[in-house]
Image (cartoon, rainbow, N blue to C red):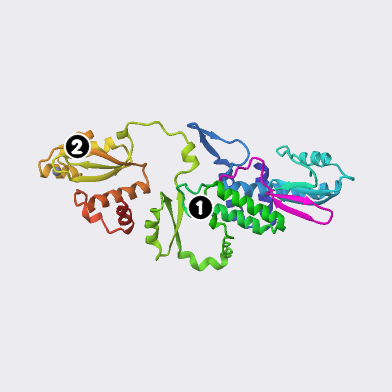
Amino acid sequence: MKETKDIIANNLISNGVDNHIRLELLNWYDTITHQNYFSNKEKTLIQQDGLAMGAPSSGLIAEFFLQNLEDTHLKKLLDKHNITAYFRYVDDILIIYDPSHTHIANIQEDFNKLHPNMKFTAETETNNHINFLDITIHKTPTKWITSIYRKPSFTDSIIPYSSNHPPQHKHAAIRYLHNRLNSYRLQQTECKEELDTIHDIMLNNGFPIHTHLPPTPRPPITPSSQRQEKTTQKWAPFTYVGKETTFITNVFKETDIKVTLRANNTLQKLLMPKSQTRDKYNRSGVFKLTCPDCNKAYVGQTGRSFIQRYKEHRSAFRSNKNTSNYAKHALEHSHKFSPIQESMQILQYQDKGAYLNTIEKYYIYKEFSTNNHLNDEANITPNKIFDAVLKLH
Ligand SMILES: [Zn+2]
């Protein structure tokens, strides 16, 4: 990481980047590479060297390092070993050489001397075939033939058609396969083979086969310079819980807000150990206090524990303080203030934050629509999304 920082620093200087911008960028580099911690089994760990796996910055930083290595050593190596062609994509390298002049083991040995942290393994062609990235290159006396390559560990699992996911996500997997097929310009036989594979993938995942038409390719991405005018457009992510979600997202059809869907049933959710169940009143979220004498209800939230919040309402009741609508109601009507188990119902668990505020608003809105509430009416305004959600229940 230190070496890469020096590489970047030198590049910034030789490209005449302003001093203060250079220092700022290097500061960012330190922040990104040093705030590299993660949790595992309730322990927080710090990674000592190397880049964070999966961080968007890691690929870019690795590329700085590799390009510098290529700039300084590659030409010498290619000349020494008579290498005809060299292609690299991220950490995969394809080289073409004449085996009568040179030996792969010698090339590999030199590559492995480039840096102590880098270890290359080599694979040579077998039966005139070699795999590079996701294609197989087949050498014939007159030309190269390419076909789609899948690792032996490949399984044809994509999101099953019956799964509760946004249809857009399911179709994206198929469109990706078709787009890849079209961008590689395969020969007829290989193309037909890949189409059959896609057909099988769809079949095995329960996709209706009539959608197996060449999908319309995505429109080309507009260069950012032409996209400027659309800066007013906002994107809003929605969690997809079923096709009913579209009732809500349809509300935005006529607006400038673009809807994007995300799924909640992710592998991470399924695989992460659940935190041990604590006493329900020690958690936070949205609750409802119901008057035992007249059934009127007060909806509230707490970012601390339900029990703490309950005690505050109770203390307002006992000391006749004007801090709780629920206590005020009980006092004014001489209704009972009953124990927590009898009066407080937990509507939803949620940690403190913007989402908690939203679900509180939703439950207040819901209570308001039943005309049975003790909340302040002044804070309740018409809400089309809540109306759409309430229509579902
Ligand atoms: Zn009452």
**Is the magenta region chiefly helix, strand or loop?**
loop
Query: In the rendering, which numbered label is found on residue 97?
Result: none
Residue 240 vs 117, above or below: the answer is: below
Q: Is residue 347 left or right of residue 235?
A: left
Going by the numbered disc 1, the residue's amino acid type is His
Which residue is rendered at x = 46% and y = 49% of the image? Answer: 165
The residue carrying mark 2 is 315
> Residue 22, percent across and down?
61, 53
Residue 248 vs 127, above or below: the answer is: below
Q: Secondary structure at mark 1?
A: helix
> Residue 287, percent across and down?
27, 42
Residue 184 vs 51, above or below: the answer is: below
Q: Is residue 134 magenta?
A: yes
> In the image shown, does 138 or 214 lie closer to the viewer?
214
Residue 161 vs 319, above or below: the answer is: below
Q: Residue furthest right?
A: 100
Which image quadrant is residue 123 in? top right
Which residues lie in the magenta part? 133-157
Q: Residues within 10 Å of mark 2 (few under 14, many from 20)?
A: some
Going by the numbered disc 2, the residue's amino acid type is Ser
* Alpha-carbon span between mark 1 and mark 2: 51 Å
Which residue is rendered at x = 26% and y = 39% of the image? Answer: 345
Disc 1, disc 2: CB below 8 Å?
A: no
> Residue 88, percent across and down?
72, 50
Instruction: Nearest to the eye among marks 1 and 2: give it.
Output: 1
> In the image shown, does 198 or 385 lie closer to the viewer?
198
The residue carrying mark 1 is 169
Q: Residues within 10 Å of mark 1 (few under 14, many from 20)?
A: some
